[in-house]
Image: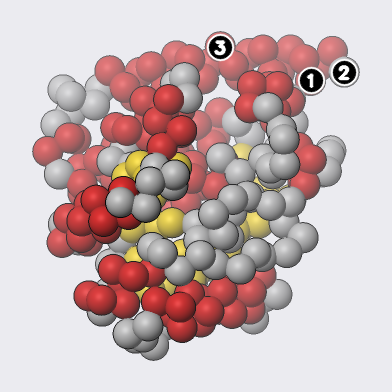
Amino acid sequence: MLIRIVRSALRLVAFVFVAGGWILRFIPGGYGRSYRGRTEWSIGCSRSLLRLFGFEWTVEGAHPGRGIVVANHLGYMDIVVFAASGPTVFVSKSEVGGWPGIGTLARLSGTIFLNRARKSDLARAAEKMGEVIADGVPVLFFPEGTSTGGDRILPFHAGLFEPAAAHGWTVTPAWIGYELEDGVVSEEVCYWRDMTFFPHFLNLLTHRRVRARIRFGQPLAPESDRKALAAAAHAAVTRLSEGR
């Protein structure tokens, strides 16, 4: 127990310095000039954080070079792992922008924040998504609308599929999962139900190693109807979760 407490404390201190170092190099490095530049910064930052946190990650399938990516959602670490896998801009709930440290990292990486309480905000988010895709960077969102413990994949909300259906953007399904040798993934890696961020994060840092796995599927056939596209994406992500 003492070893785990010390490990968590040391990693927390290192996180402050590593994240701070990446934030300080953002403007001098010229990363903010384009979404492509932001993702270059995000890849380097995410990989540094994963190594610091004791994460190992593997990617199966080809990282998509364009369009939309949709995936299941298990918690805040999903964003870090997907960001480390290749150029990606995320759509995230607006609350994340206010999280200490993590909110700053998300804003610098170009994250599109969506206020889900305002339906009118969807049009603004869709416009931003178009700007990112035009810059040659894929946009990833989690259409379940919330995170889970990994035991199932919730039905996909169709709202954010509307611009993909309207513009004919490529939609690529993806799945993410975790393995933990000294704990329970659903309780100590997944962030869901009524969990509180900081205690969960501190406990996550106690683990010696976490294994993350991403699977990218084949792009879906074009659909002009957002609900049909959402249903097809849900079926594809479910197949990926089953290793198919």
Residues under labels 2 and 3: Cα distance?
Answer: 19 Å
Find residue 113 and report its image quarter: top left
Indicate which disc residue 84 carries: none
Residues under numbered marks 1 and 2 in contact, where contact means CB atoms less than 8 Å apart? yes
Indicate which disc residue 13 carries: 3
Which residue is painted at 51% across and 65% down in the image? 157
Amino acid at pointer 1:
Arg
Q: Horizontally, is 203 left or right of 141 in the view?
A: right
Q: Horizontally, is 157 left or right of 159 in the view?
A: right
Residues under labels 1 and 2: Cα distance?
Answer: 5 Å
- Mark 2, secondary structure of its residue: loop
Amino acid at pointer 3:
Val
Find residue 20 and report its image quarter: top left
Residues under labels 1 and 3: Cα distance?
Answer: 14 Å
How many other residues sit within 10 Å of disc 1, few (<14), some (14-19) or many (≥20)?
some
Q: Horizontally, is 213 left or right of 121 in the view?
A: right
Residue beneath label 2, please? 1
Indicate which disc residue 4 carries: 1
Q: Earlier in the sequence, mark 2 or mark 3?
A: 2
How many other residues sit within 10 Å of disc 3, few (<14), some (14-19) or many (≥20)?
few
Q: Nearer the viewer, residue 188 or 49?
A: 188
Residue 43 x %, y %: 37, 43
Residue 21 x %, y %: 35, 18
